[in-house]
Image (cartoon, rainbow, N blue to C red):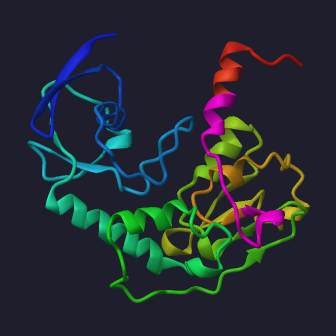
Amino acid sequence: MGVVTLTLNNQLISAREGQSLLEVIRENGVDLPTLCHLDGLSERGGCRLCVVEAEGTSRLLAACVTPVQEGMNIRTHTERLVRYRKMLVELLLAERTHVCSVCAVNGRCELQALAARLGIDHVRYEPLHPDLPVDASHGRFVLDHNRCILCGRCVRACDEVEGAHTLDFMGRGVQSRIIVDLDQPWGSSRSCTGCGKCVQVCPTGAIVARENIAGGVEKRPDFLLRILEGRQKRIWRW
């Protein structure tokens, strides 16, 4: 695999051909926020929080889906980018209903943590507060569409790791939502294996286990890498 040379925040660095900008940026110790990205899943480039500036183009590039190229000059935390990321998180908070004080993952929510990290203490946009349903038909899990940020982690984990493809998207724009099978109540799904991967990878309180509804949820999305590594090394026999 070849090596390419690029500039990251005025420092000359090297990377392997085929790596994404996000991989290289993080390997070099730069903390770039993400929500739809999760190690072990395919990239979607949906949340746009990992956008960077590249010399020679006015377009912001989503680092997770942009491969490194020889001679790139990348900036990751300009005033414009910080302002853009704050706006994106505020829009996510305004689009649905995120009342942290009554959420099962309060204090452990990735969206909440990111908002605090970006210094967001209020939202400048009028909240939509849509009256979306809560699917509590499953015996073990609950899906609250009001807290969903449509990052698609659950959809990809269900499809790419579990192989069930129970979850998917329906609708467009702010009307989008996660559906089960062909928009059935979760409890009637025949394809759901009940594995709980969607619960662990969800960055908010949109999908939680029933026993955690009262709070105290600590999700462990890093378990995906252990599963994938175990499969690759054929650790498990069955």
Magenta stretch: give its range.
208-227
Q: Is-magenta flag for residue 111? A: no
Give above or below for 34 relative to 227: below
Image quadrant of residue 73? top left
- State the image coordinates of residue 34 (x, y, percent, origin top left): 42, 51
Image label count? 0
Lateral position of residue 105 relative to residue 149, left or right: right
- State the image coordinates of residue 234 (x, y, percent, origin top left): 74, 14
Depth check: 142 or 117 in front?
Answer: 117
Depth check: 214 or 130 in front?
Answer: 214
Lateral position of residue 202 relative to residue 114, left or right: right
Q: Is-magenta flag for residue 215? A: yes
The residue shown at (58%, 61%) is 108
Give above or below for 80 relative to 24: below
The residue shown at (62%, 56%) is 202
- State the image coordinates of residue 71 (x, y, percent, origin top left): 12, 27
The residue shown at (56%, 38%) is 41
